[in-house]
Image (spheres, rainbow, N blue to C red):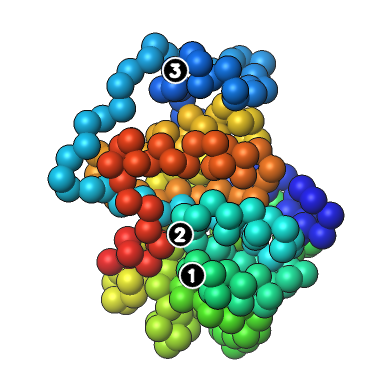
């Protein structure tokens, strides 16, 4: 990442944070593929034969993309704005340019989330280097105080999604404490689903908080071919279900894929929307 980026230590490869490996496909012509660079892993992904994109239908699906870990680089934000699509910007509260990132994103019509650091199962080094981390061992007043401090650092935030959180989001009592504060603020909630044991979405809906969950992580590894494959997977899910939520990070590889391939949403007859359009 560029100088000034927030240090998030190997977040996407944390053993305790459950991710799903997806078999990916490429649906571009050979001429278009000539302009795309692939860095293949040890076991290269399978490239399937060319198929036509789904035919457009009158009923458009909706897809939301959240860019996590924002606030470390204003240059990255400029690249995101230049996409010309309503990507949702999730800002780490103690990042170098947190408030400025939120203000610029809002001014340019992008939705802002508070990317709230919550305790992970075993990513201790990353937690130690992430200021504002809310821990499972905290008392209720401490949890509330930590949330309020983070909330004050990200102006124009309309909702929250969790940063890490595989331990915290699996605890119902802890999530109820946190979700009550979100409800008081009029926030919606997006469960990033960093563990299959999460109860966060269930508790949010029980409390009547508008909420949704992540369907696809685009960049669990920083390979352009795999990122593009997961972007297509996100589009396919949105086409099938009518809506889908993706999460990605401001890696150079991710931004390069979005610049080259985000337009393919149109081929799947999808509308790219702020994530608030998909909460219920």
Give the residue at x 42% y 68%: 189
Mark 3 highlights which residue?
29
Distance CA(mark 1)–CA(mark 2): 7 Å
Residue 266 at what x, y percent from top left?
34, 41
Give the residue at x 34% y 75%: 209
- Disc 3 crowd, CA 10 A, few/some/many (<14, 14-19, 20+): few
Mark 2 highlights which residue?
86
**Regarding mark 2 in the picture, which secondary structure is present there?**
loop
Q: Are marks 1 and 2 in contact (CB under 8 Å)?
A: yes
In the rendered image, the vertical position of residue 124 relative to residue 258, given as above or below:
below
Residue 215 at what x, y percent from top left?
40, 46
In the rendered image, the vertical position of residue 260 relative to residue 47, given as above or below:
below
- Disc 1 crowd, CA 10 A, few/some/many (<14, 14-19, 20+): some
In the rendered structure, the answer to whether residue 258 lies left or right of residue 25 reads right
- Disc 2 crowd, CA 10 A, few/some/many (<14, 14-19, 20+): many
Per the rendering, the mark at residue 247 is none
Give the residue at x 66% y 16%: 42
**Regarding mark 1 in the picture, which secondary structure is present there?**
loop
Give the residue at x 29% y 72%: 206
Mark 1 highlights which residue?
109
Most foreground residue, 95 or 132? 95
Mark closest to the chain's N terminus, 3 or 2: 3
The answer to whether residue 113 is visible is: no
In the rendered image, the vertical position of residue 233 relative to residue 168, given as above or below:
above
Mark closest to the chain's N terminus, 3 or 1: 3
Most foreground residue, 28 or 234? 28
Distance CA(mark 3)–CA(mark 2): 27 Å
Q: Residue furthest left?
A: 58
């Amino acid at each position: 990442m560029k100088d000034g980026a927030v240090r998030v230590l190997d977040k996407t490869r944390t053993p305790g944070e459950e991710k799903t490996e997806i078999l990916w496909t490429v649906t571009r012509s050979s001429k278009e593929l000539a302009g795309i660079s692939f860095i293949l892993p040890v076991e290269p992904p399978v490239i399937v034969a060319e198929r036509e994109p789904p035919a457009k239908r009158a009923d458009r699906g909706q897809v939301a993309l959240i860019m996590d870990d924002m606030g470390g680089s204003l240059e990255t934000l400029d690249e995101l704005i230049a996409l010309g699509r309503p990507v949702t910007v999730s800002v780490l509260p103690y990042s170098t340019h947190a408030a400025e990132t939120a203000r610029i994103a809002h001014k340019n019509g992008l939705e802002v989330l508070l990317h709230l650091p919550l305790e992970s199962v075993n990513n201790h080094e990353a937690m130690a280097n992430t200021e504002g981390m809310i821990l499972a061992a905290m008392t209720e007043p401490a949890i509330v105080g930590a949330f309020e401090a983070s909330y004050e650092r990200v102006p124009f935030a309309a909702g929250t999604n969790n940063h890490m959180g595989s331990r915290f989001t699996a605890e119902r009592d802890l999530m109820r404490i946190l979700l009550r504060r979100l409800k008081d603020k009029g926030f919606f909630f997006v469960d990033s689903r960093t563990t299959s044991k999460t109860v966060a979405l269930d508790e949010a809906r029980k409390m009547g908080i508008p909420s949704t969950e992540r369907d696809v992580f685009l960049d669990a590894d920083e390979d352009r071919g795999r990122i593009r494959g997961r972007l297509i997977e996100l589009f396919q899910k949105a086409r099938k279900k009518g809506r889908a939520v993706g999460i990605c990070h401001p890696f150079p590889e991710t931004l390069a894929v979005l610049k080259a391939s985000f337009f393919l949403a149109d081929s799947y007859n999808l509308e790219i929307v702020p994530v608030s359009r998909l909460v219920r």
